[in-house]
Amino acid sequence: MIYIRSFIFFIFQSVTAVIFSCVGVVLWPLPFKWRYAVVSQWAKSNIWLLAKICDVHLEVEGKENIGEEPAIIICKHQSAWETLALQTVFPPQVWVLKRELFWIPFFGWGLASLKPIAIDRKAGRKALSQVIEQGLDRLSSGAWVVIFPEGTRIARGFIGRFGIGGARLAVETGYPVIPVAHNAAKAWPKHGFVKYPGVIKMVIGEKIASKDVAAGDLNQQLFDWMEDKMTQLEGQKPVLQERKP
């Protein structure tokens, strides 16, 4: 039954992705917040369908820490789940992501309509400058910026080294940071087709000020917070996974 439910969810997810991506392209001339309000319904409907079809539910701790001021979200990356769930919990947001995602038919078109910060991860300093420049533009316009500092999805029980981009963006712009941990991989594993019933817990930390602090120190503070929360969520300290060259 679990495989049948997962297949039904996959069909709904795929069909609605095409529909909402086309809608996003049609709405491109409209202001970002209008486009986002419509296109983000895809993510919200997927989280709802995930609960109804696959019995996978969302539990949020620390929602009171969000507030109204735009901030930089530093989020654990285990699954595709968090890219959907963040849109149901936080205000309008954009993501720092690899530009190759734009090449995916339909999905990439809809994604592009939401003004993400698309980078070439091999570009080094140029990519970092792009994150800072475009990140300031998005934050100034009222959008939140989502960064997955590990750079890629990391399997359950592991944690990746944090890239400096999120901390540098915060220090350079003066906007605060909110760390987010979760245990999505227990229900929706990395690259997993099968969705296992259960409750995924998202933990939202308190805002961390970025003024008068070095980017390296802020990055280490965020890593330590994430490591501690993942230890609590998964019952054991995550193993450090080095980045591939």
Image (cartoon, rainbow, N blue to C red):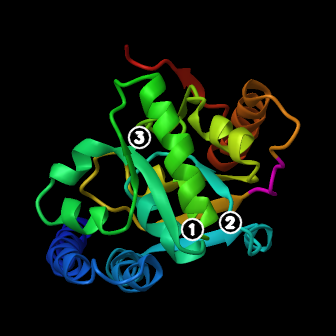
What range of the chain is rendered magenta?
Answer: 205-209
**Residue 153: which disc?**
3
Vertical relation: 50 (above or below) 166: below
Q: Secondary structure of the magenta portion, mostly?
A: loop
Residue denoted by label 1: 143
Q: Which comes sooner in the sequence, label 2 or label 1?
A: 2
Q: Nearer the viewer, mark 1 or mark 3?
A: 1
Find numbered disc 3 in the image and state the secondary structure of the residue it sits on.
Answer: loop
Quarter placement of the N terminus: bottom left
Residue denoted by label 2: 70
Find numbered disc 2 in the image and state the secondary structure of the residue it sits on.
Answer: loop
Instruction: Give 203 or 123, whichever is nearer the viewer.
Output: 123
Q: Which comes sooner in the sequence, label 1 or label 3?
A: 1
Q: CA distance from mark 2 to mark 3?
A: 25 Å
Find numbered disc 1 in the image and state the secondary structure of the residue it sits on.
Answer: loop
Q: Residues within 10 Å of mark 1 (few under 14, many from 20)?
A: many
Q: What's the residue at 59%, 30% (across, down)?
A: 162
| Residue type pointed to by label 1 | Ala
| Residue type pointed to by label 2 | Pro
In the orientation shown, which residue stands out farthest toward the top? 245
Q: Is residue 228 visible?
A: yes
Q: Is residue 3 magenta?
A: no
Q: What's the residue at 40%, 78% (across, down)?
A: 40
Q: Residues within 10 Å of mark 3 (few under 14, many from 20)?
A: some
> Residue 223: where, in percent of width, then height?
69, 33
Q: Which comes sooner in the sequence, label 2 or label 3?
A: 2
Q: What's the residue at 50%, 32% (across, down)?
A: 128
